[in-house]
Amino acid sequence: MQPQQPDRHGRPGADLKAFLAAVPEHVLVVVDEAYHEFVTDPDVPDGRTLLDDHPNLVVLRTFSKAYGLAGLRVGYALAGDQAVAAALKQVQVPFAVSRVAQDAALACLDPEAEKELFTRVDTVLAERARVENALRGMGYAVPPTQANFVWLALGERTADWATGCAEQRVIVRPFAGEGVRVTIGAPGENDQFLDAARALAG
């Protein structure tokens, strides 16, 4: 699925609240907040604050992104209605996570581990801004992002551009005819990607 490009003129908080108000109460609404820890836009709402007013809302969070547990596939759901939470528990067996994954997730909630999380997120945010600004300076169309990746709208250049990156030992995720998604890495990795992007600009 192609990453959605944010509307520069929209207000995500107001838009989401208007949407929730318009959805019938018997219709379940699921909001995926996998990248919640990377959000810096004050207008992007925290789904937890909407649960009391919208019992048909479920908010999804994960330990795969900011917490770095992608290989363990562990996350959780927050529900405004206890009946929804109970229903989720009834179907959780096929999606159960291992004891190791559960222990790792619980360890992430330790205060010392959370301090490391905030430090890691701050580093990603600083690198995200640096990469965004550098790409725009090269002339690339890069919409604002609230995740741990950037999106380059490359259109028909996408496949060739991704191949060019691979030739320079940089792997990006192409979406044919649309653009590429690039995860923000360590500073050195980002420098290598920017060198490739610079060579392919124009």
Image (cartoon, rainbow, N blue to C red):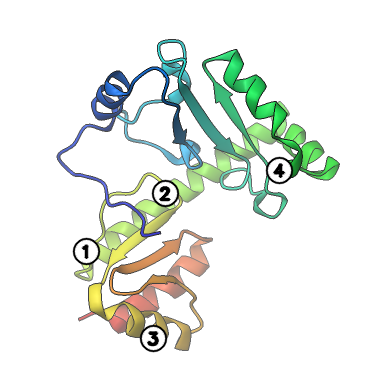
Residue pointed to by mark 3: 164
Q: Residue at x 60, y 14 (%)?
A: 82
Residue pointed to by mark 2: 126
Q: Residue at x 26, y 46 (%)?
A: 6
* Secondary structure type for disc 3: helix
Alpha carbons under labels 3 and 2: distance apart: 26 Å
Q: Give the quarter of the figure containing the C terminus.
A: bottom left
* Secondary structure type for disc 1: loop
Q: Amino acid at mark 3?
A: Gly
Q: Amino acid at mark 1?
A: Ala
169 sits left or right of 142 in the view = right
- Indicate which disc, 1 or 2, sits on the residue closer to the N terminus: 2
Residue pointed to by mark 1: 141
Q: Residue furthest right?
A: 99
Alpha carbons under labels 4 and 2: distance apart: 35 Å
- Indicate which disc, 4 or 2, sits on the residue closer to the N terminus: 4
- Indicate which disc, 4 or 3, sits on the residue closer to the N terminus: 4
Question: How many residues crowd around disc 3 within 10 Å: few (fewer than 14), some, or many (20 or more)?
Answer: some
User: x, y percentage for residue 152?
Assistant: 30, 65
Q: Is residue 152 above or below residue 100?
A: below
Quarter of the view holding residue 157? bottom left
Residue pointed to by mark 4: 95
Alpha carbons under labels 4 and 3: distance apart: 38 Å
Could you say which is closer to the camera, residue 115 or residue 65? 65
Front: mark 1 or 4: 4
